[in-house]
């Protein structure tokens, strides 16, 4: 009986520890020293997001970092471009949901890297985005993903990323 009581007590303590120290995505961003940028206007005839049921589809976003990875930019600079794009995507998610805690999970990510034909480290570049999502959203930030190289992107931006997330009901 004492062992059962001790196990039960430990379980309650663990539950309350997680509850007390759980942080919202916004709190995590603040603790990381990151600011959510303003959401800009689309550069063409489209919308930044579209909700269908409990799925939220985001249009492609890119950073204010320009050039081809493998020629103008290193893998590390591409990684930083993908991370900057991640902050822009978080801004769109916040505008679309009003509360980042409404995100149940990231479902699918398509990362496009503006790269030279011989460049093959697209996954290492798009990790800049993926790593940030896991840092901010924890397990909910893990996603299925494609990382591809393309010959050009709008305005010569280094990366473009589109996302599908599932929202809480």
Image (cartoon, rainbow, N blue to C red):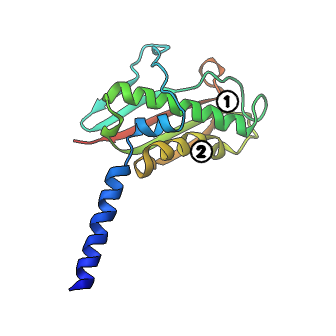
Q: Residue furthest right?
A: 71
Q: Is residue 167 left or right of residue 124?
A: left
Residue in the image at 55% along x and 45% along y: 131
Give the mark, 2 or 1, whose residue is nearer the N terminus. Answer: 2
Quadrant in the picture for residue 149 = top right
Residue in the image at 35% along x and 56% along y: 18
Q: Which residue is mark 2?
A: 127
Q: In the depicted view, which residue is nearer to us: 112 or 83?
A: 83
Give the distance between the C-alpha atoms of the residues marked 2 and 1, in whole angstroms: 20 Å
Q: Position of residue 39 (x, y in %)?
A: 45, 19
Q: Position of residue 122 (x, y in %)?
A: 65, 42
Q: Position of residue 88 (x, y in %)?
A: 50, 27
Q: Residues within 10 Å of mark 2 (few under 14, many from 20)?
A: some
Q: Which SS class for mark 2?
A: helix
Quarter of the image where the N terminus is located: bottom left
Q: In the depicted view, which residue is nearer to us: 143 or 9?
A: 9
Q: Which residue is mark 1?
A: 151
Residue in the image at 38% along x and 29% along y: 94
Quadrant in the picture for residue 103 = top left
Quarter of the image where the C terminus is located: top left
């Amino acid at each position: 009986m004492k062992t059962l009581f001790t196990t039960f007590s430990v379980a309650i303590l663990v539950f309350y520890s997680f509850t007390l120290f759980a942080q919202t995505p916004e709190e995590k961003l603040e603790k990381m020293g990151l600011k959510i940028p303003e959401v800009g206007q689309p550069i063409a005839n489209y919308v930044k997001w579209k909700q269908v049921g409990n799925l939220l589809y985001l249009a492609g976003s890119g950073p204010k970092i320009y050039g081809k990875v493998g020629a103008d930019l290193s893998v590390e600079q591409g990684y930083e471009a993908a991370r900057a794009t991640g902050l822009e995507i978080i801004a769109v998610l916040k505008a679309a949901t009003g509360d980042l805690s409404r995100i149940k999970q990231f479902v699918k990510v398509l990362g496009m890297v503006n790269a030279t034909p011989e460049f093959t480290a697209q996954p290492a570049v798009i990790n800049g985005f993926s790593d940030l999502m896991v840092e901010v959203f924890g397990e909910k930030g893990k996603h299925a993903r494609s990382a591809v190289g393309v010959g050009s992107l709008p305005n010569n931006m280094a990366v473009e990323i589109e996302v599908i997330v599932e929202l809480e009901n």
